[in-house]
C-alpha cells in the first residue's frame, strides 16, 4: 500500500516538473516573439534583435563603475556601565561614513541608450517628439519612484510603459513605435535612477547600478512593452 503511494507521488512530481518546464519554455518563446515584433516596429531585423538580446543578457551581469557617493549616517552603540554593582546599558550615538559605488549596467542602461540613439539617428523627424516624451515619462516616474532602504529605487511596474505608450500616441499617432521606445527606456532610466542618485548612499547598498539588474529591469523591458502598447491605445 505504501509502495503504491510512493510511486504515485513520484510520477506526480515528474509530471509537475515537466509542466513547469513547458510553462517556462512557452513564456520564454512568447517573450522572444513579442520582443522581435517590438524591435521590428522600430526598424530592426530579426538578426539584429538576437544580437541585442544576447548583448543585453550578457551585459546584465556587467557594471561599469563611474564614481562614488559618500554620506554620513548615525550609528547607535550600546555600552555597559556598572554602578554599585548594578549594570546599566547606555546607548551612545556615533557617526560613520558610508560609501556607495555608482556604476552603469551594460545590459540595463548602455544598450537601451545605444538602441535609442540609433533609432533616433535613423528617424530624425521623431527626435523632438521622443525628447518631449522621455521628459514627461521621466517626470512621472520620478514622482512615483520610492527609495527603499536595503532594496533600492522601486517604481510601479506598469507606470513607465503605459505613460510612454500614451504619450507617444498623443505626440506621433502616425508612427508611435520609435517615440514609445525612447520615451519608455530613457524616461525610466532618467526618472528612476539618474534623478535619484542624490542620497543614494543612505539606502545602505555598497553599489548603486544605473539600469538596475539589467535584462528584465524597468528600462529595457519598459521600452519593449511601450512599443507593443502604443498601437493599441
Image (spheres, rainbow, N blue to C red):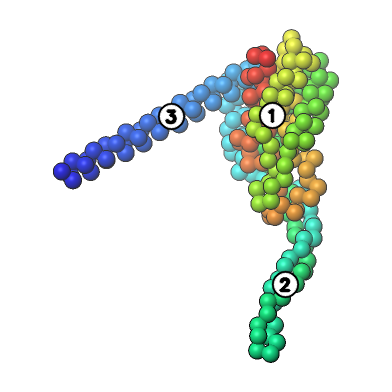
Give x and y (percent) for residue 34.
57, 21
Nearer the camera: disc 2 or disc 3: 2
Give x and y (percent) for residue 5.
21, 42
Q: How far apart are the alpha carbons under marks 2 and 1?
A: 44 Å
Give x and y (percent) for residue 219.
68, 33
Instruction: From the image, tell me which residue sits under label 2.
Output: 91
Q: Name the image quarter holding residue 122.
A: top right
* Image label count: 3
20 or 66, nearer to the observer: 20
Residue at the image point whose x is 72% and y is 12% from the top: 175
Is residue 202 in view?
Answer: yes
Residue at the image point whose x is 65% and y is 89% from the top: 85
Residue at the image point whose x is 51% and y is 23% from the top: 30
Instruction: From the image, tell me which residue sits under label 3.
Output: 23
Quadrant containing the N terminus in the rendered view? top left
Nearer the camera: disc 2 or disc 1: 2
Amino acid at each position: 500500500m505504501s509502495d503504491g503511494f510512493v510511486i504515485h507521488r513520484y510520477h506526480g512530481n515528474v509530471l509537475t516538473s515537466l509542466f513547469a518546464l513547458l510553462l517556462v519554455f512557452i513564456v520564454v518563446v512568447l517573450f522572444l516573439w513579442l520582443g522581435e515584433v517590438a524591435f521590428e516596429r522600430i526598424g530592426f531585423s530579426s538578426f539584429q534583435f538576437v544580437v541585442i538580446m544576447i548583448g543585453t543578457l550578457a551585459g546584465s551581469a556587467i557594471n561599469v563603475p563611474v564614481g562614488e557617493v559618500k554620506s554620513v549616517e548615525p550609528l547607535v552603540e550600546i555600552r555597559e556601565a556598572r554602578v554599585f554593582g548594578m549594570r546599566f546599558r547606555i546607548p551612545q550615538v556615533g557617526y560613520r561614513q558610508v560609501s556607495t559605488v555608482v556604476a552603469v549596467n551594460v545590459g540595463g542602461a548602455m544598450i537601451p541608450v545605444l538602441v535609442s540613439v540609433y533609432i533616433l539617428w535613423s528617424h530624425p523627424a521623431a527626435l523632438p517628439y521622443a525628447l518631449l516624451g522621455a521628459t514627461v515619462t521621466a517626470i512621472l516616474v520620478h514622482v512615483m519612484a520610492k527609495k527603499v532602504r536595503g532594496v533600492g529605487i522601486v517604481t510601479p511596474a506598469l507606470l513607465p510603459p503605459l505613460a510612454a505608450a500614451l504619450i507617444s500616441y498623443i505626440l506621433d499617432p502616425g508612427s508611435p513605435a520609435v517615440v514609445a521606445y525612447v520615451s519608455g527606456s530613457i524616461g525610466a532610466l532618467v526618472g528612476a535612477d539618474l534623478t535619484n542618485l542624490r542620497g543614494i548612499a543612505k539606502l545602505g547598498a555598497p553599489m548603486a547600478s544605473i539600469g538596475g539588474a539589467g535584462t528584465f529591469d524597468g528600462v529595457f523591458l519598459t521600452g519593449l512593452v511601450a512599443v507593443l502598447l502604443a498601437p493599441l491605445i
